[in-house]
Image (cartoon, rainbow, N blue to C red):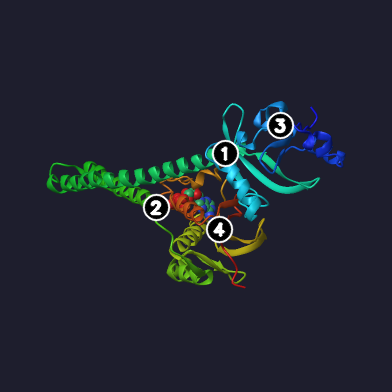
Amino acid sequence: MPFSSLKQDDTFSKDNLLSDSSNLWAVMNTVLDGLVIIDSNGFIQAFNPSAVKIFDYQLHEVIGQNIKMLMPDPYCNNHDSYLTNYKSTKVAKVIGIGREVSGKRKNGEIFSMELGINEMWLDGNLMFVGTIRDISDRKKAEEEMAAFVTALKHSNQELDDFAYIASHDLKEPLRGLSNNAQFLKEDYKDLIDEDGVKRIDRIVYLCERMETLVNDLLYFSRIGNQALAIKEIDLNHVIEDIASMMDTTLIVENAKILIPQKLPTIACDVLRITEVFRNLITNAIKYNKKEYKIVEVGFNQVDNKTRKEFVFYVKDNGIGIPEKYHQDIFRIFKRLNDEEDHVKGTGVGLTFVKKIIERHGGHIWLESELNLGTTFYFTIGGTHSNE
Ligand code: ADP
């Protein structure tokens, strides 16, 4: 269907309106955006095929009609006075500016559109050209996305709250269980044989272990709930503090922490980030059977889309992690070495590490080779260099 402008009086007939612009005519017929031309009183003079598609009106239904028919309340009521006002004052709300507004289709459906309006003069007559883009699909997708994010945040919050409440409530009966087992051992010692005592000790041990797990769960939920105290932190001091706290372990384990290059200063929560490095360094020594245990802490600077980003790493020469467990190890209470192992742990360290890093807007991943060692890499969102 050709782009057309019909008019009751022939001032703006198709030939007249675009008589010098047959190329322009062709362009208007093919552009994806809707184009509507109105006269200075708001009557539609031209309506291209994309506009037909967007508003679902046929050409003969709109040409010569007031543009208000394409606008929902309350805009349609104000349009006449807006045009009059503009013509006398030249103060524009949309003309030459462009903005997001609502349009009305033939079936009455209101939809979001981007509207750009410019004035033009044709044969001495003031006209307005409106460019219309139907953004209802995009808007709908944005709204769905926003609703999804809100629901996700809500369910994350609920999970954190649940973990907090459940672990809090579990502690009481657990303590009762442990205390009663102790009383049993003390008050009935003449009645219980050696095997029985061993079993009671095992109950007490398992209660203690369960209490540690419950505390870990409590702490896990707290990391998700508490606000971060973000400050500029020199990471060299963080690693020095960790090394000095671990000095005995480093000697006993024959372990060394190497820092090949001075670390940067970054914006982060120092307590949490210390915890990240401490967990990774402790694991690098714990899961290591080499005579000389080497832990290297460093960083690379990589080009992200918009800025330079630090990728930190903690590298060891330990036992390595089979590839099939590279995701699992971040799950709470997941351990690859069972309880009989001399290496003790509850399987929460890496879960905390991941959660802290993600709360900082970063992410964590690893590379590993069995018996050669593991390197954990992570970013901390919003970091920047002090150089
Ligand atoms: P935990 O050390 O208390 O078991 P983590 O969450 O810190 O808990 O680690 C989970 C599991 O991942 C560990 O049990 C261990 O099997 C494995 N792991 C973690 N770090 C390393 C490492 N550097 N080298 C080899 N295995 C590791």
The residue type indicated by label 1 comes to: Cys
Q: Earlier in the sequence, mark 3 or mark 4?
A: 3
Question: What element does badge 4 sit on?
Answer: loop
At x 35%, y 46%, the residue is: 161
The foreground one among 133 and 386 is 133
Question: What element does badge 2 sit on?
Answer: helix
Q: For the residues marked 2 and 1, what is the alpha-carbon distance in whole angstroms?
A: 48 Å
At x 39%, y 46%, the residue is: 160
The residue type indicated by label 3 comes to: Ile
The foreground one among 20 and 215 is 20
Q: In this figure, which residue is indicated by the disc labeled 4? A: 381
Q: In this figure, which residue is indicated by the disc labeled 2? A: 225
Q: Is 348 placed left or right of 302 in the picture?
A: left
At x 76%, y 33%, the residue is: 9
Q: In this figure, which residue is indicated by the disc labeled 1? A: 76
Q: For the residues marked 1 and 4, what is the alpha-carbon distance in whole angstroms?
A: 47 Å
The residue type indicated by label 4 comes to: Gly
Q: In this figure, which residue is indicated by the disc labeled 3? A: 63
Instruction: Mark yes or no: residue 342 visible.
Output: no
Q: Earlier in the sequence, mark 1 or mark 4?
A: 1
Tag shown at residue 244: none
Q: Earlier in the sequence, mark 1 or mark 3?
A: 3
Q: For the residues marked 1 and 3, what is the alpha-carbon distance in whole angstroms?
A: 17 Å
* Mark whose residue sits in front, 3 or 4: 3
* Residue 121 pos. (x, y %): 77, 48
CA neighbours of label 4 inside 10 A, class few (<14), some (14 to 19), many (20+) = some
Image position of 382 with respect to 36: above or below:
below
Q: Is 158 placed left or right of 5 in the picture?
A: left
* Residue 268 pos. (x, y %): 49, 63
Q: For the residues marked 4 and 2, what is the alpha-carbon distance in whole angstroms?
A: 18 Å
Q: Earlier in the sequence, mark 3 or mark 2?
A: 3
